[in-house]
Amino acid sequence: MPKSIFVANALPDDAMRLIPAGVEIDYNATDTPLSKAELIRRLKGKDGLICHITTTVDDEVLASPGLKAVANVAVGFNNIDVAAARRRGIIVTNTPDVLTETTADFAWALLMAAARRVVEADHYARSGAWTAWKWDLLWGHDVHGKTLGVVGFGRIGRAVARRARGFDMRVLYHDTVRPDPTVERELNATAVDLETLLRQSDFVSLHTLLSPDTRHLVGERTLRMMKPTAILINAARGPVVDEAALVRALTEGWIAAAGLDVFEEEPTIHPGLLTLRNVVLAPHIASASGETRVAMATLAVRNCLAVLEGRPPLTPVQ
Ligand code: DGY
Protein backbone atom coordinates (compact mmCIF):
# COMPACT_ATOMS: atom_id res chain seq x y z
CA MET A 1 0.00 0.00 0.00
CA PRO A 2 1.44 3.44 -0.85
CA LYS A 3 1.80 5.80 2.11
CA SER A 4 -0.52 8.77 2.26
CA ILE A 5 -0.36 12.20 3.84
CA PHE A 6 -3.00 14.83 4.41
CA VAL A 7 -1.45 18.30 4.30
CA ALA A 8 -4.13 20.36 6.01
CA ASN A 9 -2.76 23.84 5.28
CA ALA A 10 -0.67 25.63 2.66
CA LEU A 11 3.06 24.89 2.68
CA PRO A 12 5.89 26.39 0.59
CA ASP A 13 6.67 24.51 -2.63
CA ASP A 14 10.20 23.77 -1.38
CA ALA A 15 8.69 21.69 1.41
CA MET A 16 6.01 20.00 -0.69
CA ARG A 17 8.66 18.96 -3.22
CA LEU A 18 10.33 16.79 -0.56
CA ILE A 19 7.39 14.38 -0.55
CA PRO A 20 8.40 11.50 -2.86
CA ALA A 21 6.26 10.72 -5.88
CA GLY A 22 5.20 7.38 -4.41
CA VAL A 23 3.45 9.01 -1.47
CA GLU A 24 -0.20 9.94 -2.01
CA ILE A 25 -0.97 13.53 -1.00
CA ASP A 26 -4.26 15.21 -0.28
CA TYR A 27 -3.48 18.91 -0.02
CA ASN A 28 -5.60 21.76 1.30
CA ALA A 29 -3.42 24.46 -0.25
CA THR A 30 -5.06 27.29 1.66
CA ASP A 31 -4.62 28.99 5.00
CA THR A 32 -8.27 28.55 5.88
CA PRO A 33 -8.62 25.95 8.63
CA LEU A 34 -10.99 23.13 7.76
CA SER A 35 -14.06 22.37 9.81
CA LYS A 36 -13.59 19.42 12.13
CA ALA A 37 -15.96 17.28 10.03
CA GLU A 38 -13.99 18.07 6.85
CA LEU A 39 -10.68 17.40 8.60
CA ILE A 40 -11.90 14.01 9.80
CA ARG A 41 -13.29 13.16 6.34
CA ARG A 42 -10.09 14.01 4.50
CA LEU A 43 -7.82 12.42 7.09
CA LYS A 44 -9.56 9.08 6.83
CA GLY A 45 -7.12 6.35 5.84
CA LYS A 46 -4.08 8.67 5.82
CA ASP A 47 -0.81 7.70 7.50
CA GLY A 48 0.31 11.22 8.26
CA LEU A 49 -1.08 14.68 8.95
CA ILE A 50 0.92 17.89 8.45
CA CYS A 51 -0.78 20.97 9.86
CA HIS A 52 -0.50 24.50 11.14
CA ILE A 53 -1.44 25.67 14.64
CA THR A 54 -4.88 26.66 13.33
CA THR A 55 -5.80 22.97 12.97
CA THR A 56 -7.17 21.52 16.19
CA VAL A 57 -6.15 17.89 16.51
CA ASP A 58 -8.19 16.41 19.34
CA ASP A 59 -8.88 12.82 20.29
CA GLU A 60 -11.71 12.52 17.78
CA VAL A 61 -9.42 13.61 14.95
CA LEU A 62 -6.67 11.31 16.21
CA ALA A 63 -9.08 8.37 16.08
CA SER A 64 -8.55 8.32 12.31
CA PRO A 65 -7.72 4.67 11.51
CA GLY A 66 -4.11 4.12 10.46
CA LEU A 67 -2.86 7.57 11.47
CA LYS A 68 0.79 7.32 12.55
CA ALA A 69 2.15 10.86 12.59
CA VAL A 70 1.01 14.42 13.22
CA ALA A 71 3.64 16.94 12.15
CA ASN A 72 2.89 20.41 13.44
CA VAL A 73 4.48 23.28 11.52
CA ALA A 74 5.22 25.19 14.73
CA VAL A 75 7.25 24.82 17.87
CA GLY A 76 4.11 25.21 20.03
CA PHE A 77 1.73 22.26 20.00
CA ASN A 78 -1.21 23.32 22.17
CA ASN A 79 -3.48 22.70 19.15
CA ILE A 80 -2.79 18.96 19.49
CA ASP A 81 -3.94 16.61 22.24
CA VAL A 82 -0.50 15.11 22.74
CA ALA A 83 -1.59 12.83 25.59
CA ALA A 84 -4.33 11.33 23.42
CA ALA A 85 -1.86 10.85 20.57
CA ARG A 86 0.52 9.05 22.90
CA ARG A 87 -2.27 6.73 24.09
CA ARG A 88 -3.04 5.91 20.48
CA GLY A 89 0.61 5.36 19.56
CA ILE A 90 0.64 8.33 17.17
CA ILE A 91 3.87 10.33 17.01
CA VAL A 92 3.59 14.11 17.28
CA THR A 93 6.40 16.33 16.04
CA ASN A 94 7.05 20.09 16.14
CA THR A 95 9.60 22.48 14.65
CA PRO A 96 11.97 23.73 17.36
CA ASP A 97 15.42 25.27 16.74
CA VAL A 98 14.79 26.45 13.18
CA LEU A 99 12.65 29.34 14.44
CA THR A 100 14.46 30.23 17.65
CA GLU A 101 16.50 33.20 16.45
CA THR A 102 13.77 34.59 14.20
CA THR A 103 11.22 34.49 17.02
CA ALA A 104 13.68 36.08 19.43
CA ASP A 105 14.40 38.81 16.86
CA PHE A 106 10.72 39.62 16.72
CA ALA A 107 10.25 39.59 20.50
CA TRP A 108 13.14 42.06 20.59
CA ALA A 109 11.52 44.16 17.87
CA LEU A 110 8.32 44.35 19.94
CA LEU A 111 10.35 45.28 23.01
CA MET A 112 12.17 48.07 21.18
CA ALA A 113 9.01 49.28 19.45
CA ALA A 114 7.03 49.43 22.69
CA ALA A 115 9.88 51.07 24.62
CA ARG A 116 10.67 53.71 22.00
CA ARG A 117 7.10 54.17 20.72
CA VAL A 118 8.05 53.34 17.14
CA VAL A 119 4.50 52.69 15.94
CA GLU A 120 3.15 55.89 17.47
CA ALA A 121 6.07 57.79 15.95
CA ASP A 122 5.33 56.34 12.52
CA HIS A 123 1.65 57.32 12.74
CA TYR A 124 2.58 60.80 13.93
CA ALA A 125 5.14 61.33 11.17
CA ARG A 126 2.68 60.30 8.48
CA SER A 127 -0.24 62.25 9.90
CA GLY A 128 0.97 65.71 9.01
CA ALA A 129 0.87 66.69 12.70
CA TRP A 130 4.66 67.14 12.78
CA THR A 131 5.21 70.81 12.16
CA ALA A 132 8.36 71.47 14.21
CA TRP A 133 11.07 69.61 16.12
CA LYS A 134 9.89 69.29 19.71
CA TRP A 135 11.94 68.75 22.83
CA ASP A 136 9.38 66.56 24.60
CA LEU A 137 7.91 64.71 21.64
CA LEU A 138 7.19 60.99 22.13
CA TRP A 139 9.48 60.33 25.05
CA GLY A 140 9.92 56.62 25.60
CA HIS A 141 11.91 54.35 27.90
CA ASP A 142 15.58 53.41 27.62
CA VAL A 143 16.29 49.75 26.97
CA HIS A 144 20.07 49.64 27.53
CA GLY A 145 21.18 49.10 31.09
CA LYS A 146 17.74 47.99 32.30
CA THR A 147 16.57 44.68 33.75
CA LEU A 148 15.01 42.07 31.49
CA GLY A 149 12.87 39.30 33.02
CA VAL A 150 12.44 36.21 30.87
CA VAL A 151 9.58 33.91 31.83
CA GLY A 152 10.27 30.51 30.28
CA PHE A 153 13.99 29.95 29.76
CA GLY A 154 13.88 27.48 26.89
CA ARG A 155 15.49 28.01 23.52
CA ILE A 156 13.64 31.20 22.62
CA GLY A 157 13.81 32.71 26.10
CA ARG A 158 17.56 32.17 26.11
CA ALA A 159 17.92 33.67 22.64
CA VAL A 160 16.12 36.78 23.87
CA ALA A 161 18.41 36.89 26.91
CA ARG A 162 21.41 36.71 24.56
CA ARG A 163 20.18 39.81 22.75
CA ALA A 164 19.97 41.62 26.10
CA ARG A 165 23.72 41.23 26.55
CA GLY A 166 24.34 43.62 23.68
CA PHE A 167 22.23 46.18 25.52
CA ASP A 168 24.18 45.80 28.79
CA MET A 169 21.09 44.56 30.55
CA ARG A 170 20.73 42.58 33.75
CA VAL A 171 18.83 39.37 33.01
CA LEU A 172 16.53 37.57 35.43
CA TYR A 173 14.70 34.42 34.43
CA HIS A 174 12.02 32.16 35.80
CA ASP A 175 11.49 28.55 34.75
CA THR A 176 10.58 25.29 36.40
CA VAL A 177 13.72 23.72 34.94
CA ARG A 178 17.17 25.10 35.78
CA PRO A 179 19.61 25.04 32.83
CA ASP A 180 23.22 23.99 33.06
CA PRO A 181 25.15 26.60 35.14
CA THR A 182 27.29 27.33 32.08
CA VAL A 183 24.18 28.66 30.32
CA GLU A 184 23.48 31.01 33.24
CA ARG A 185 27.09 32.18 33.21
CA GLU A 186 27.22 32.64 29.46
CA LEU A 187 24.00 34.66 29.45
CA ASN A 188 24.74 36.37 32.76
CA ALA A 189 21.25 35.34 33.83
CA THR A 190 19.98 34.81 37.37
CA ALA A 191 17.18 32.42 38.29
CA VAL A 192 14.51 33.99 40.49
CA ASP A 193 10.96 33.21 41.52
CA LEU A 194 8.21 34.74 39.42
CA GLU A 195 7.30 37.41 41.93
CA THR A 196 10.88 38.69 42.19
CA LEU A 197 11.14 38.74 38.41
CA LEU A 198 7.92 40.71 38.05
CA ARG A 199 8.79 43.18 40.79
CA GLN A 200 12.35 43.87 39.57
CA SER A 201 12.12 43.76 35.78
CA ASP A 202 11.76 46.73 33.47
CA PHE A 203 10.85 44.40 30.62
CA VAL A 204 9.05 41.09 31.08
CA SER A 205 9.19 38.80 28.06
CA LEU A 206 7.04 35.65 28.00
CA HIS A 207 8.39 32.47 26.39
CA THR A 208 6.49 29.65 28.09
CA LEU A 209 4.48 26.88 26.52
CA LEU A 210 0.73 27.14 27.01
CA SER A 211 -0.41 24.61 29.59
CA PRO A 212 -2.97 24.55 32.40
CA ASP A 213 -0.18 25.88 34.65
CA THR A 214 0.65 28.85 32.44
CA ARG A 215 -2.88 29.87 31.37
CA HIS A 216 -3.39 33.44 32.70
CA LEU A 217 -0.01 33.33 34.40
CA VAL A 218 -0.05 37.06 33.78
CA GLY A 219 -3.31 38.36 35.20
CA GLU A 220 -4.49 41.03 37.64
CA ARG A 221 -2.50 39.70 40.60
CA THR A 222 0.76 39.35 38.71
CA LEU A 223 0.36 42.54 36.64
CA ARG A 224 -0.04 44.48 39.88
CA MET A 225 3.37 43.18 40.98
CA MET A 226 5.07 44.81 37.98
CA LYS A 227 6.63 48.28 37.99
CA PRO A 228 4.44 51.11 36.67
CA THR A 229 7.22 51.73 34.14
CA ALA A 230 7.43 48.07 33.07
CA ILE A 231 6.78 46.79 29.55
CA LEU A 232 5.28 43.34 28.89
CA ILE A 233 6.16 41.35 25.77
CA ASN A 234 4.23 38.25 24.70
CA ALA A 235 5.45 36.24 21.72
CA ALA A 236 4.51 32.89 23.32
CA ARG A 237 0.79 32.07 23.43
CA GLY A 238 -2.09 34.48 23.95
CA PRO A 239 -3.84 32.72 26.84
CA VAL A 240 -0.72 33.03 29.00
CA VAL A 241 -2.00 36.59 29.52
CA ASP A 242 -5.45 37.51 30.81
CA GLU A 243 -6.23 40.16 28.18
CA ALA A 244 -9.05 41.81 30.13
CA ALA A 245 -6.67 42.34 33.06
CA LEU A 246 -3.96 43.59 30.70
CA VAL A 247 -6.32 46.19 29.22
CA ARG A 248 -6.98 47.49 32.75
CA ALA A 249 -3.27 47.45 33.56
CA LEU A 250 -2.44 49.49 30.45
CA THR A 251 -5.36 51.87 30.89
CA GLU A 252 -4.94 52.47 34.60
CA GLY A 253 -1.12 52.65 34.53
CA TRP A 254 -0.25 49.52 36.52
CA ILE A 255 2.35 48.99 33.76
CA ALA A 256 3.59 51.33 31.03
CA ALA A 257 3.21 49.43 27.77
CA ALA A 258 3.04 46.07 26.03
CA GLY A 259 4.08 44.41 22.78
CA LEU A 260 1.91 41.49 21.77
CA ASP A 261 2.22 39.00 18.93
CA VAL A 262 -0.32 36.51 20.28
CA PHE A 263 -3.85 36.79 21.64
CA GLU A 264 -6.35 34.80 23.65
CA GLU A 265 -8.89 34.32 20.83
CA GLU A 266 -6.89 34.69 17.62
CA PRO A 267 -7.57 36.26 15.20
CA THR A 268 -9.85 38.32 17.43
CA ILE A 269 -8.08 40.94 19.52
CA HIS A 270 -9.64 42.24 22.73
CA PRO A 271 -11.37 45.50 21.66
CA GLY A 272 -9.82 47.29 24.64
CA LEU A 273 -6.34 46.67 23.23
CA LEU A 274 -7.24 48.05 19.80
CA THR A 275 -7.81 51.56 21.09
CA LEU A 276 -4.74 51.84 23.32
CA ARG A 277 -1.66 53.67 22.10
CA ASN A 278 0.69 52.08 24.63
CA VAL A 279 0.48 48.65 23.08
CA VAL A 280 2.14 47.39 19.89
CA LEU A 281 0.10 44.66 18.20
CA ALA A 282 1.19 42.07 15.64
CA PRO A 283 -0.80 39.24 14.01
CA HIS A 284 1.18 36.23 15.34
CA ILE A 285 4.16 36.68 13.01
CA ALA A 286 7.17 36.19 15.30
CA SER A 287 8.51 33.28 13.25
CA ALA A 288 7.42 34.80 9.94
CA SER A 289 10.59 35.38 7.96
CA GLY A 290 10.68 33.73 4.56
CA GLU A 291 13.73 31.64 5.46
CA THR A 292 12.33 30.44 8.75
CA ARG A 293 8.86 29.60 7.53
CA VAL A 294 10.39 27.47 4.74
CA ALA A 295 12.69 25.79 7.28
CA MET A 296 9.72 25.04 9.56
CA ALA A 297 7.67 23.53 6.75
CA THR A 298 10.64 21.51 5.51
CA LEU A 299 11.29 20.13 8.98
CA ALA A 300 7.63 19.19 9.40
CA VAL A 301 7.62 17.30 6.10
CA ARG A 302 10.87 15.51 7.01
CA ASN A 303 9.42 14.55 10.39
CA CYS A 304 6.28 13.12 8.84
CA LEU A 305 8.19 11.18 6.19
CA ALA A 306 10.57 9.76 8.80
CA VAL A 307 7.71 8.29 10.83
CA LEU A 308 6.02 6.91 7.73
CA GLU A 309 9.29 5.29 6.64
CA GLY A 310 9.84 3.76 10.09
CA ARG A 311 12.72 6.05 11.04
CA PRO A 312 12.86 8.17 14.22
CA PRO A 313 11.53 11.69 13.59
CA LEU A 314 14.02 14.55 13.84
CA THR A 315 12.09 16.57 16.42
CA PRO A 316 9.43 14.56 18.23
CA VAL A 317 7.35 16.18 20.95
CA GLN A 318 8.56 14.28 24.00
C1 DGY B 1 5.07 28.48 16.81
O1 DGY B 1 5.94 27.97 16.12
O2 DGY B 1 4.60 27.93 17.80
C2 DGY B 1 4.54 29.80 16.37
O3 DGY B 1 3.73 30.38 17.31
C3 DGY B 1 3.78 29.68 15.07
O4 DGY B 1 4.67 29.87 14.07
Image (spheres, rainbow, N blue to C red):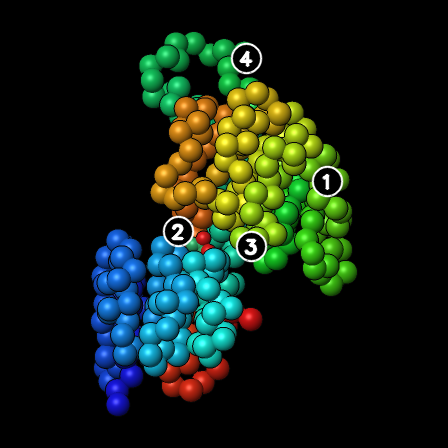
Q: Quadrant of ligand 1?
A: bottom left
Label drawn at residue 211: 3
Tell me if residue 98 can be seen: no
Q: Which residue is mark 2?
A: 288
Horizontally, residue 198 falls left or right of residue 255, namely right
Q: Secondary structure at mark 4?
A: loop
- Residue 148 vs residue 216, the one in the foreground: 216
Q: Amino acid at mark 2?
A: Ala
Q: Amino acid at mark 3?
A: Ser
- Residue drawn at the location 28% of the way across and 67% of the way down: 40
- Cα distance, mark 1 to mark 2? 32 Å
Q: Which residue is mark 1?
A: 195
Relative to 194, is 227 above or below?
above
Q: Amino acid at mark 1?
A: Glu
Q: Check the picture and name the quadrant holding the C terminus.
A: bottom right
Nearer to us: label 4 or label 1: 1
- Cα distance, mark 2 to mark 3? 23 Å
Q: Secondary structure at mark 2?
A: loop
Relative to 21, is 178 above or below?
above
